[in-house]
Amino acid sequence: MSPLLTGTGLHRSYGPTPALRGIDVEIGEGEIVAVTGPSGCGKSTLLHCLAGILKVDSGEVRYRDQDISLWTEAARSRLRRTEFGVLFQFGQLVPELTAAENVALPLLLAGSGRREARKAATMWLGRFGVGDLADQVPGKMSGGQQQRCAVARALVTEPKVLFADEPTGALDVLTGEQVLTEIVHVTREQGTSVVLVTHEPQIAAYADREIALRDGALDPSGLGLGIGS
Ligand SMILES: Nc1ncnc2c1ncn2[C@@H]1O[C@H](COP(=O)(O)OP(=O)(O)OP(=O)(O)O)[C@@H](O)[C@H]1O
């Protein structure tokens, strides 16, 4: 079976600073892959390039056999609204909107009607145990509740790939593991692939496979955090 998403020969620099120095990766359908490595090794840059948020300097990012690195920003942005979900360490909810309005937003941007979007948002908040907070603004919620809303917002469009950059990094260990367990449960149920950036072994342990980076390249030792070995 061909992989859902592949990166081939990915290079990306920030001015004179090389962040990715020729990386090859494959993400299979429904696979949960942890991207690990020390601070500054290029984990977030890789995630941003695979998600089409950042353009690579050279190399190919193929999604379903299309080279999205050649696409315009508008086309990649459309892809992120429909096929991809993105989740960051700090949920980045819109502070003025309620939980339900935040979660409904990607659906409204993709053209859904208000009622339909609100209904789906409520259902997804419920799936992550925060259905009773639908009318609450983020400032009135705990960090774990906010991140659960952010997860619901990332998954409400039922994306094929979830890109999660240290999604539990701002939470205490117990809450972080609870949220990650819920993410894994729901993405497995939906058959969603997950690219999970983390530097924590106990978080990476939830993945099927690990891609270990060092200095912008695949870690030549292949040891990483030792997931799946
Ligand atoms: N916006 C930027 N401008 C300049 N240099 C950057 C920028 N973003 C990242 N870098 C550099 O690119 C390299 C890779 O950074 P990246 O954030 O991808 O690493 P990371 O492994 O995700 O790090 P961390 O675990 O600390 O978040 C580092 O040397 C970093 O300093």
Image (spheres, rainbow, N blue to C red):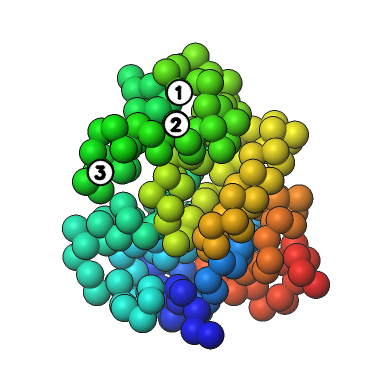
In the shown orientation, is residue 12 left or right of residue 229?
Answer: left
The Cα atoms of the two marked residues, 1 and 2, are separated by 7 Å
The three-letter amino acid code for the residue at tag 2 is Thr
The Cα atoms of the two marked residues, 3 and 1, are separated by 19 Å
Task: Please report whichever mark, 1 or 2, sits nearer to the chain's N-terminal start.
Answer: 2
Secondary element at tag 3: loop
Secondary element at tag 1: loop
Q: Can residue 103 be spotted in the picture? A: no
The Cα atoms of the two marked residues, 2 and 3, are separated by 15 Å
Tell me the quarter of the picture where residue 35 sits.
bottom right
Q: Can residue 155 be spotted in the picture? A: yes
Q: Nearer the viewer, residue 155 or 67?
A: 155
Q: Position of residue 179 (x, y in %)?
A: 64, 39
Secondary element at tag 2: helix
**Contact flag, marks 1 and 2 (Cβ < 8 Å):** yes
Q: Position of residue 224 (x, y in %)?
A: 72, 66
Q: Residue furthest top?
A: 140
Q: Residues within 10 Å of mark 2 (few under 14, many from 20)?
A: many
Residue labelled with disc 2: 122
Q: Residues within 10 Å of mark 1 (few under 14, many from 20)?
A: many
Q: Residue furthest bottom?
A: 1
Which label sits on residue 134?
1
The three-letter amino acid code for the residue at tag 3 is Ser
In the shown orientation, is residue 109 left or right of residue 183?
Answer: left
The three-letter amino acid code for the residue at tag 1 is Ala
Residue labelled with disc 3: 112
Q: Is mark 3 within 8 Å of ligand 1?
A: no
Q: Is residue 93 above or below residue 67?
A: above
Which label sits on residue 199?
none
Report how many numbered discs are placed on residues in the image.
3
**In percent of the image, x 43 and y 26: which residue is there?**
99
